[in-house]
Every structure is written in structure tokens, then in C-alpha cells.
Image (cartoon, rainbow, N blue to C red):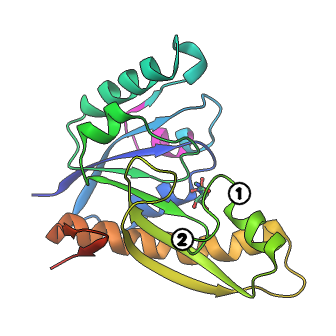
Amino acid sequence: MRSRLVVLISGGGTNLQALMDAPQDAYEVVGVISDRSEAAGIARAVARGIPTDVVIPSACADRAEWDRVLADAIGRWTPDWVVCAGFMRVLGPAVIAGFPWRIINTHPALLPAFPGAHGVRDALDYGVRVTGCTVHLVDSGVDTGPILAQHAIAVDPDDDEATLHERIKVEERRLLVNVVTALCAQGCTVTGRKVSIP
Ligand code: GAR
């Protein structure tokens, strides 16, 4: 049976698109949630007939309520896995506890370097010659969960944030689809910071 995937997005949704476009023997995307009503990725889900929801923090009394509302929204679709694909907010305790080691995030840098919202810009500003992307399980920290897979990308001398991010995203989409497919097909075991996919 295919795993049920709920995907969280904030923006353009090209990673979501890659997940929807890949041959889906291992999983099906059963719902897409955004924290922004204007996120372009919503239209990508609608075009596929996939149900969507928007859970906006400013519509909630506080962060704790947003966390609970988001956990309920995700839970309604009874997912096996939750994928943060360009979701630009830190998940709260209700979501993390609701789906232990069942939440996957993709990040445009080689963690633990350059976590947070500006991974590409921070790597460029630091002057690294190599950066990349990381797919990892989500814990309660900011991009601190156990690492599932990484891909390195060389920084060109004339890269700016946009050109570098675009190159990273080409590999990131491939990596994310491969990891999600493997997890859905085989599951994983977490021992300390190490994750093994049988
Ligand atoms: C991706 O590069 C993802 O790693 C990044 O946002 C982009 C979303 O692209 N996420 C973060 O920076 C989270 N810290 P997309 O909307 O086209 O999939």
C-alpha cells in the first residue's frame, strides 16, 4: 500500500511539484498545507486535484494555537509522512509530537552549516566554495534533526543567491524525491543522530 504524504509549503512549490511528478509507487500526496494563502505552490496542488489547506499564524491567537491548528490540519489526512518542502516556519511541539520521526525537511545548505531561513545567502556571505542541500528528519530545533542525505554543489565565483539557489534546487528536488521514496517504501530506524534506511 502506498504511504500517505502531507506536504507543507510556503512558496513556489517546485519541490512539491517534483514529489507529485515522480512515479508514485511508494507514496501518494494526500494533502498540501501552506502558511501563506498566496503561496504559488497551492495552485500546483489544485492543478493535480490534491486537497489544500492554509493555516496562517496571524489568524491564530498565538504560536501555540497555530501549532495545534496545524497539527489538527495535518492529522485530518492521516499521513504516514509529513514533508516540509520549502516550509519557512519552525514547527511547534504539537506537530512534532504528533508525528515522531515522521517529518522530513529539505534545506538548501550542508547542515549543520547555515541553518535557518537564509541558508543560501549565509553560505555565500561566508565565502564557502562548496555548499549543497540536506534532507533530514525534523526534531524540535531549527534544522537540527538527524540527517538522511546530502548533496554537495560547488559555488561559482560569479554566483549570486538566485543562481546558486537555482542550481541547488535542481539537485535538491532529486534528493528529496529519492529519500521520500526510500522512506515510504522501507521506513527507517533512528539511533541517536544516525538514521538507517534498510
Ligand atoms: C528550497 O530550496 C528549500 O530547501 C528552502 O526553500 C526552497 C523552496 O523551494 N527551504 C528553506 O530554506 C527552509 N529553511 P520550492 O518552494 O520551489 O520548493
For image coordinates 55% across by 78% down, the residue present is 171
State left or right for residue 42 relative to residue 102: right
Q: Residue 148 vs residue 120: left or right?
A: left
Residue 116, quarter of picture: bottom right
Q: Residue at x 50, y 57 (%)?
A: 143
Picture coordinates of residue 50, whole percent (x, y): 37, 40
Q: Point out residue 52 in the picture as x, y percentages from the top left corner.
A: 42, 32
> Relative to 119, does residue 159 appear above or below in the rendering?
below
Q: Secondary structure at mark 1?
A: loop
Q: Of the numbered discs in the image, which one, if any, rests on residue 118?
A: 1
For marks 1 and 2, give the CA distance. Answer: 12 Å
Residue 44 part of the magenta segment = yes
Check disc 2 and report the residue beneath it: 111
**What residue is drawn where x is 47% and y is 75%?**
174
The span picked out in magenta is 43-52
Q: Residues within 10 Å of mark 2 (few under 14, many from 20)?
A: many
In the rendered image, which quarter contains the N terminus? bottom left
Reading the chain from its start, which is encountered first: label 1 or label 2? 2
Q: Quadrant of residue 96?
A: top left
Q: Are marks 1 and 2 in contact (CB under 8 Å)?
A: no
| Secondary structure type for disc 2 | loop
Q: Which amino acid, by three-letter code, is at mark 1? A: His
Nearest the camera: 37 or 129? 129
What amino acid is found at the position of numbered circle 2 in the picture?
A: Leu
User: Which corner quadrant holds the C terminus?
Assistant: bottom left
- 143 inside magenta stretch: no
Q: Residue visible at 24% across and 67% down? A: 183
Q: Which mark is residue 75?
A: none
Front-most of residues 23 and 79 = 79
Judge from the rendering whether residue 187 lies leftward or rightward of residue 36; answer left or right: left
